[in-house]
Structure formats: C-alpha cells, structure tokens
C-alpha cells in the first residue's frame, strides 16, 4: 500500500507539472490586447493658438495606450524655437519616441512620430508622394506587433499612389499584427479608403468625425489592421476623444484583442 501511494504521488506530481506547462504554453500563444491611438497634434498648438506641450501630453496620458501615431511634428525648427516637439511629449508621457522627417523645414525637420510604451525593436520609414509637400510613413516594430504612422497628401492621386506603396512595404510582415494609423486626408467613401480596405480592416469608427476638433464634420483620421489569415481579432472598443482645444484634430483610439 505504501508503494502504491508513493507511485500515486509521483504520478499526480508529474501530471500537475504537465498541466502547468500546457497552461503556460496556452498563455504564451493566447490573446493579446492592444490599444492603439492616432493623433494629429499640430505641434501641440491648440484651437486657442497656444502651444502647450503639457496639455497635449495630458490628452495622450488620459488615453493610456500602448502606442500612439502622431502627425504634424516639428523637430528643431525655428517655428518650434529649436525644440523637438516629439521629445517634449515623450518626456511628459514617459514613452519611447520614434520620429521620421517628411521634409526639411524652417531650419529643422517636419514629419511623423510614434510614442510607445515599450522600446521598439526596429524603426523604418518610406517616402510617399505629395505635390504640395512630400509625405512619409513611419514604421515601428515592437516585440509582438507593428505600428505604421502616416499623414497623406491633400492630392487624391498622391493618396492613391501612397496606398499602393504602403501595401507593398508592409507585405513583409506576416507573423505579427500590423496597424496603420494617421491623418489620411480622405473621407470614408473615397477611392483611397475603399482601396485600402481590400487588404486592411478598419478598426476605428468611421461614423465619428475627427476634424475640425471644435465642431467636427469630417472623418479623415483612421486606424486599420492589416488582414492576415493567421490572426483573428475582436474590436473591444473604438472611440474618438471629445477633445476640442488641444489641436485642430480630435484624437482617436481602438482597443483590440488579437490571437
């Protein structure tokens, strides 16, 4: 009887370890919840024409996101009094900053940025067409996902060409969820947004206007996720923040489960 009890204990102990390992593996392969935002901050210049980094950073902090794609950023320009706007926001949000210049401007640079809670593994960028000014897309790769930030041209042909370039560049990401966020300067029914929707899933709510921030009438800011047969997703929430003063655009965010 003692021998039987001994082997029974060994069996139960081994079984419990096996179950524990299985549960760990399931957790590692399980669902991840990500909260992604987009915000055209206009260099932290509000509708009152006051530049206020603290105010803009507070809006970002209140969203409490994993990553926020940011458009309209000066870097060491005369207009920003030599300040790097994204770095000012990063200091106030305690997030990692990634920047890409679309153009040289006013003694410095001007372009798109990203703030992320975790340190990026890799940062890339591609140039996009813009006949009024050159545009770009910033791509930030993190441990479990990729976020792209862009601000497309005011010209329809340039935007359509940009969509094709974005599609081509992001084809290489096959094992991680890829998000695309920014100011597209295009309405939901436009050919550009329809074309993008062939390979991307719209996560943000296209019924909530984002511009201008005081009395919004246009939907031109979006958050997408690239279609991937290997990944499933569930949108937990999508919101345009009722922020009327900090910029001329309202920020938006989505929370999504990906597995």
Image (cartoon, rainbow, N blue to C red):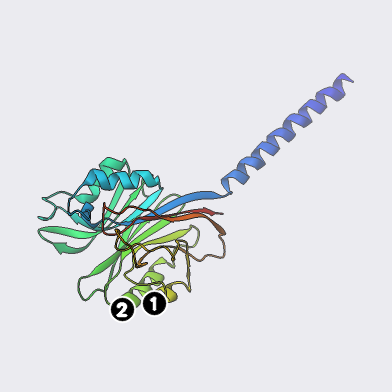
Please say if 194 is above or below 141. Answer: below
In contact (CB < 8 Å): disc 2 and disc 1? yes
**Percent x, y for residue 120?**
36, 49
SS of the residue under disc 2: helix
**Which label sits on residue 228?**
none
Question: Badge 1: how crowded within 10 Å, few (<14), some, or many (20+)?
Answer: few
Q: Left or right? Give the position of 175 relative to 193.
A: right
Question: Who's the residue at 53% across and 49% down the image?
Answer: 32
Foreground label between 2 and 1: 1
Q: Alpha-carbon distance for marks 2 and 1?
A: 9 Å
What is the quadrant of residue 157 in the picture? bottom left
Which quadrant does the C terminus fall into?
Answer: bottom right
Question: Who's the residue at 23% across and 57% down the image?
Answer: 42
Q: Left or right? Give the position of 23 relative to 201.
A: right
Q: Residue furthest top?
A: 2
Question: Who's the residue at 62% across and 46% down the image?
Answer: 26
**Percent x, y for residue 104?**
15, 63
**Percent x, y for residue 7?**
82, 27
Please say if 248 is above or below 66. Answer: below
Is tag 2's residue or tag 1's residue first in the polypeptide sequence? 2
Q: Residue furthest right?
A: 1
The residue pinned by badge 2 equals 156
Which quadrant does the N terminus fall into?
Answer: top right
The residue pinned by badge 1 equals 190
Please say if 59 is above or below 3. Answer: below
Question: Who's the residue at 32% across and 75% down the image?
Answer: 159
């Amino acid at each position: 009887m003692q021998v039987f009890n001994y082997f029974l204990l060994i069996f139960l102990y081994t079984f419990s370890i096996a179950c524990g390992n299985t549960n760990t593996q399931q957790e590692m392969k399980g669902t991840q919840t990500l909260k992604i935002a987009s915000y055209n901050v206009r260099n932290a210049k509000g509708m009152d024409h006051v530049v206020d980094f603290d105010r803009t950073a507070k809006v970002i902090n209140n969203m409490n996101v994993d990553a926020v794609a940011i458009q309209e950023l000066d870097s060491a320009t005369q207009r920003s009094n030599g300040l790097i706007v994204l770095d000012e926001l990063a200091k106030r949000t305690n997030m990692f900053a990634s920047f890409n210049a679309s153009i040289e401007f006013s003694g410095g640079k001007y372009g798109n940025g990203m703030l992320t809670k975790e340190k990026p593994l890799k940062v890339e960028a591609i140039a996009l067409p813009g006949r009024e000014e050159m545009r770009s897309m910033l791509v930030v790769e993190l441990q479990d996902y990729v976020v792209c930030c862009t601000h497309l041209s005011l010209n329809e042909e340039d935007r359509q060409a940009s969509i094709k370039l974005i599609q081509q560049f992001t084809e290489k990401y096959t094992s991680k969820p890829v998000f695309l966020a920014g100011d597209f300067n295009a309405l939901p029914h436009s050919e550009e947004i329809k074309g993008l929707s062939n390979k991307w899933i719209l996560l943000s709510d296209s019924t909530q206007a984002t511009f201008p921030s005081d009395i919004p009438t246009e939907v031109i800011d979006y958050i997408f996720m690239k279609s991937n047969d290997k990944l499933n997703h569930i949108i937990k929430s999508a919101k345009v923040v009722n922020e009327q003063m900090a910029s001329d655009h309202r920020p938006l965010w989505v929370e999504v489960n990906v597995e």
